Amino acid sequence: MTLPDDPDVPDDTTLEAVVGLLDDEHVRTILTATSGDALSAKELSERCDVSQATIYRRVERLTAAGLVDERTRPRADGHHDTVYVATLDEVSIRLRNGELRFDLERRGNDVADRLTRLWEDF
């Protein structure tokens, strides 16, 4: 399994956990939606046509697996929103010589990425 050197990303994510998550239609919709835009639970609820409680449960599982990241989006009125963005970039599963292996690649979290996200939040 390929994982970045990031202390906030769990390095014990298993194939079973990832496949279990991806088997959920709402999880797939959340990942797809947040792969392009950082979205709030309310925005995700509207896109998935489910309650915000359902979104929060799914996002909690995705965050625990290191597949979604929680961020803060400032608003013009001085308040802020919690938004979610997919960190999952690619999952690959291989069967070779009687062994099942998988790689899980996440989007980078280097300084340039953080500065880009900061700039996008303004």
Image (cartoon, grey):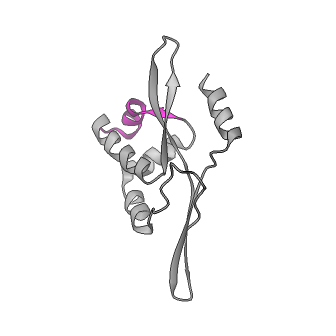
**Region in magenta:** 38-51
- For this orientation, the residue located farthest to the bottom is 97
Query: Compared with residue 5, is residue 110 higher up or lower down, i.e. above or below?
Result: above
Residue depicted at 47% across the width and 33% down the height:
83
- Residue 112 is situated, as x and y percent measured from the top left of the image, at 71, 39
- For this orientation, the residue located farthest to the right is 112
**Image side of residue 98 versus residue 115, left or right:** left
The foreground one among 86 and 4 is 4
Query: Compared with residue 28, is residue 34 higher up or lower down, i.e. above or below?
Result: above
Quarter holding the N terminus? bottom right
Q: Quadrant of residue 115?
A: top right
**Image side of residue 57 versus residue 8, left or right:** left
Please state the total of marks drawn on the protein image: 0
- Residue 88 is situated, as x and y percent measured from the top left of the image, at 54, 52
- Residue 108 is situated, as x and y percent measured from the top left of the image, at 64, 49
Query: Compared with residue 84, is residue 9 higher up or lower down, i.e. above or below?
Result: below
Residue depicted at 39% across the width and 33% down the height:
41
Give yes or no for residue 45 being in the magenta stretch.
yes
- Residue 7 is situated, as x and y percent measured from the top left of the image, at 53, 51
**Image side of residue 52 versus residue 33, left or right:** left
- For this orientation, the residue located farthest to the top is 77
Quarter holding the C terminus? top right
Q: Quadrant of residue 45?
A: top left
The foreground one among 79 and 97 is 79
The foreground one among 78 and 58 is 78
